[in-house]
Image: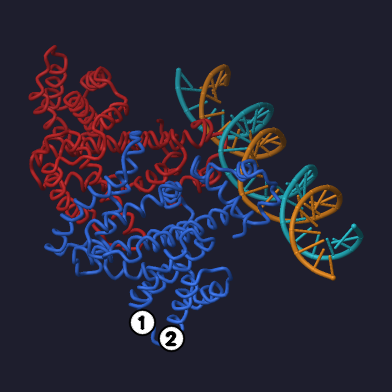
Chain colours: A blue, B red, C orange, D cyan
Amino acid sequence: MNKRKKVIAEHALSLFVEKGISQTSIQDILDRASISKGTFYNHFSSKHECVSAILEQARYDATLMRAEFIIGKDPTDDTVLAEQITVLSTINRARGLDVVFEEILHSGDSELKQIVLEYRMYEIVWLANRFQEVWGVEKHGQAIEAAIIFFGMMQHISFTRKMIHQKTLDIKVITNVCLLYMKEIVGVMVEKQSQVLDAQLLENFVDSLNKLDVTEEEVVEQLAQFHLLPDKTKSQQEITEALLAEFQLTQKREVVIDALLRSFGKEFTSSPYLLEAKEISSLLWYIINQRKRS
Amino acid sequence: MNKRKKVIAEHALSLFVEKGISQTSIQDILDRASISKGTFYNHFSSKHECVSAILEQARYDATLMRAEFIIGKDPTDDTVLAEQITVLSTINRARGLDVVFEEILHSGDSELKQIVLEYRMYEIVWLANRFQEVWGVEKHGQAIEAAIIFFGMMQHISFTRKMIHQKTLDIKVITNVCLLYMKEIVGVMVEKQSQVLDAQLLENFVDSLNKLDVTEEEVVEQLAQFHLLPDKTKSQQEITEALLAEFQLTQKREVVIDALLRSFGKEFTSSPYLLEAKEISSLLWYIINQRKRS
DNA sequence: ACGATTTTATACTAGAGGTATAAAAAAATC
DNA sequence: GATTTTTTTATACCTCTAGTATAAAATCGT
């Protein structure tokens, strides 16, 4: 997405959040973005594709933010989990994406639905893995079901909050209460071996949803390009080089990559390269973790 | 609603369930119902009002069915609760209303949203009362929050089931598992006195939603008319008379009304008056219970 | 059989998404 | 700085949908 396209997309998103997607006309977008029809259709082939592009971008951004935030936290810590969930929910709510997602999920547009589902399923799978780590849930299928129930509770409480016009309700509070309840449920779930959703169908569905559309080669190439950029401090240059070297080994040492990534982002704080460093860091983290899972 | 209007409404509903409301054009409805545009707009002032009328009708029907089913069951029995919830969910799912409801709730149409919310809130309040009866939850606010969480779980599991294309999943199974989990949650909830939604705001919201739009006077009048109809058996006539007399007392004895209502409907089994008897019975039950609550 | 109501067919409006095109403006290239 | 090339704009147009208007035909109540 180039600058202009991004500006249009942001105006469109703000309208979608305000009035809903179906209630927003192309003309509304043209007016708010102060562009002509031709320009709009120069960047997007249709309204549908405009929404789709916004969703993809949002997903991309959110995934990076998520990955960045999750890097190097103790995976068995109870409170870390609560914190992570809070951040994830906040990311979605801050941009008003939660509302847009719900509208799409319950509308007739199956293409857009697919995109949102992929987004959601990624979160569900992530949370399921976390449940396994934190509470020692053994069966993956059960963990996924638990994650689904958890998000169901969260979403329903949030929705009702909006309905009754309750302004003040911290996501952190909702998260903690839901986690409290979830712990009990997981206890019963494991004890009684209860599972209503078909484990195999769930796995199939999760597998059918492709995650972020980047390959390891692409990201490493991006890292290589980044390595060539001038005006970096000595330590910035060194850690970039070390990371690059590690990825070019035939036998990558994950523990080393893990260690390097934890410092990589921090090294570029208050540097003009901060944004790109963060992106690369998140993407690499994502790729490493994805390989681990499959 | 007269016959013709009902036929059109049914064809429209079948289309809404199949393709979604927004995806259904007036022309689709005209084609399926084999009517002309003029006829449609003779009965409904707009597509919006058509949906609205269908929802009102569905709500009316469902409320009667619900009330009828709930009459005279042991209110503290665990399994009765499970059975009741199953029936309620089945009623909505059988007509495809659940899908339509979700589409409306997450679309921009705030008028229709209001109708669905009233429908939903009625169920939530009902379930909250049941939780208080069955599990002895003391605080009404907590019971309502529990009901919200419960429906959240149910709905999210059903939604996911549809997503992963799992055909076979009995509502009964979902209900029982969710109740199992809910029991644990309620335990923690009461113990820790946890509540995230503002009790006062919840109460206000529930109060702001008007229930079925019938007054006691109207229903009693309907009963009086019913009483005058010919060709009833002796016992039918007697119980009708007794019921009518009870409602005309200045100090109605609820326990007597309760007892009479339990038999009233049964008395008209395989009688041509069955339908009307059931409707009257349900309405009276509804009115009695509503007074109890407020 | 007759008057009232309902239904139909048809033509119409306004607003939506989307296409096409020529001229103006901006950016890139030399 | 002049000239290409690309982007943007304005305008006119197309199709589809919701909804209105109206006169003629069919149906209904009595």
Same subunit: marks 2 and 1: yes
| Position of residue B188 measured from the top left corner of the image (x, y, whole percent) | 13, 47
Residue, far top: B250
Q: Circles 2 and 1: CB distance less than 8 Å?
A: yes
Eyeballing the image, is B142 above or below B166?
Answer: above
| Position of residue B93 measured from the top left corner of the image (x, y, whole percent) | 31, 49
Q: Is residue B246 left or right of residue B223?
A: left
Eyeballing the image, is A198 above or below B205?
Answer: below
- Closest to the observer, A274 or A267: A267
Q: Chain of mark 1?
A: A
Q: Report the residue at 20% width, 20% height from top.
A: B227
Going by the numbered disc 2, the residue's amino acid type is Leu
Residue, far front: A234
Q: Report the residue at 51% width, 44% height from top.
A: B29
- Closest to the observer, B119 or A171: A171
Q: Is residue D10 left or right of residue B182?
A: right
Q: Chain of mark 2?
A: A
Q: Residues within 10 Å of mark 2 (few under 14, many from 20)?
A: few
Residue, far bottom: A250
Q: Which residue is mark 1?
A: A253
- Closest to the observer, B219 or A3: A3
Eyeballing the image, is A177 above or below A209?
Answer: above
Quadrant for the N terminus of chain B in the image: top left
Instruction: Name the element at disc 1.
Output: loop
| Position of residue B289 measured from the top left corner of the image (x, y, whole percent) | 18, 28
Q: Which residue is mark 2?
A: A249
Instruction: Name the element at disc 2.
Output: loop
Going by the numbered disc 1, the residue's amino acid type is Arg
